[in-house]
Amino acid sequence: MKIAFLINNAYGIGGTIRSTANLSRAFADRHEVEVVSVHRSKDTPAIPFDPRVTMTTLIDTRPGSRALTTGPLAQRPSTMFPGPAAPRVSAAIPYSALHDDRIGGWLRTTRADVVIATRPDLNGYLARDGQRRCVRVGQEHLSLAGHSDAVRTAQNGVIGRLDAFVTVSEADAAAYRAALPDVPTRIRCIPNGVPAPVVEGSARDADVIVAAGRLIPVKRYDRLVDAFARVADAHPTWTLRLYGRGPKQAQLRERIDRLGLYERVQLMGSVAPIETEWAKGSIAAVSSDKESFGMTIVEAMHCGVPVIATDCPHGPGEIITHDRDGVLVPLDAGVEGYALALHRLMSDRELRDRLAAGALRRAADFAPERVAQRYEDLFHALGAGRAPVRATPAPWWRRLRAALLPVRATPSRRAAQSRVLASARSGADGEIVFRFPAGSLAWGELDLLVRLRRDPKGREVRV
């Protein structure tokens, strides 16, 4: 089966991109997979995609490209979604007829068996221009209530022309079914897939609280900082690290300074991959007013870090079972309630370890392989091909030669390499500890070659 994803910009950073990278990698074990990025803003994706996945770009928007501004199509408005619901490349650049031409042209000619669109305007293109012979699946990575009235109305108007519409929470799927009781489209919840980290999990021996996400109003990092301020004196060795960038950064810095926490609360900027930072913490904090899913929650769980999260719509409460694999704080408990939850976990190492064990078990439910299987079940129910692609038989003369001539063993290139796989853990103080399987190291001098994943400069250190 050939499965294609339609995404706005696979070269940026965000939850939709991470989710698409994870799911496409899981599909690639059994299917031919293509990720079609409407825009390409960089030479290489910031979030890596599996090399088995074909990457296709419709409009090049890298520095120096004039594709968005030149030509007659770029000067005409898009016909996808009217008025305030009209899709945009950025706040200053709306979609144009060029987008209609490129996206519609690809949809009308693709040979994919399944096409998955990943945001409202792309769901609109898929409903309008997608071929009826293929299974057309729209995704909701926010929520029904999370859109403006204009976007909500526009997207709801096209969902009935899709074969399926997938949300990341059961509560949101129920909301869509209630809002669209007469559409024939199958509305299902399938959560995001989150892979296990490639780093060693947290030992929970550092007095560090970690939070990660865009610094935007809905994440309510002001609530987290204020809650930490209330318990800081009772826990003088603890620090709070906030990872991410966004429009609230300056206000958060001012708040931290005003509370006298400039040595205890650190704005760390964006870091990828983030799992190395989760593994340095003993508590993960989510303080949002809304979370459509909560990928950061599952990422922290995978690293063995207990999570304190506000019980906001919709994701946290569907991921965390209170006091079994994390802690939920009612939204109406405010700063005081969040501070009490922090104090409870900061004071109790045994509780942190117990919740971490539960978190590791729960995180396994979101393995991309399991999520991919749920999607495959949906595709098959909608009529997509079930049979795997069979390999083309070798020519008759090659089969005859193989039968008549003796087989010579060819040494494996992989086997010829003497490489040992080690696990690594980074401590809160920057110390790195490597662990090797017993008996795996040969006698004599050894080289240690260290590379930073996704380093655009390709730097390496040999010790």
Image: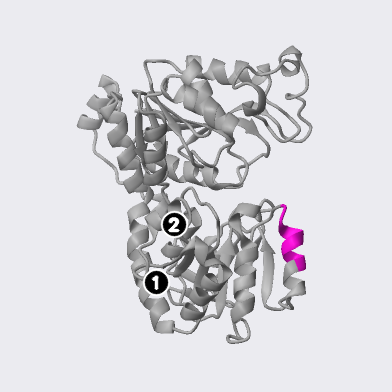
Q: Main secondary structure of the magenta part?
A: helix
Part of the protein shown in magenta: 247-254
Residue furthest left in the image = 403
> Under tag 2, what secondary structure?
helix
**Who's the residue at 38% across and 54% down the image?**
318
- Residue 151 percent coordinates (x, y): 57, 31
- Residue 395 percent coordinates (x, y): 29, 21
Q: Say which residue label 1 marks.
A: 356
Q: Quadrant of residue 159?
A: top left
Q: Is residue 336 above or below residue 198?
A: below
Badge 1 amino acid: Ala
**Who's the residue at 45% across and 50% down the image?**
314
User: Which of the labelled discs sits on residue 170, or is there none?
Assistant: none
Looking at the figure, which quarter contains the C terminus? bottom right
User: Which of the labelled discs sits on residue 316, or is there none?
Assistant: 2
Q: In which quarter of the image is residue 95?
A: top right
Residue 224 within the magenta-colored segment of the rendering? no
Is residue 261 left or right of 354 when viewed as pictured?
Answer: right
Q: Distance between the residues labelled 1 and 2?
A: 16 Å
Looking at the figure, which quarter contains the N terminus? top left
Between residue 181 and residue 412, name the one nearer to us: 181
Q: In this view, does 34 lie above or below 448?
A: above
Between residue 159 and residue 394, name the one nearer to us: 159
Q: Which of the two marks, 1 or 2, is nearer to us in this view?
A: 2
Badge 2 amino acid: Pro
- Residue 167 percent coordinates (x, y): 42, 40
Say whether disc 1 or disc 2 marks the residue closer to the N-terminus: 2
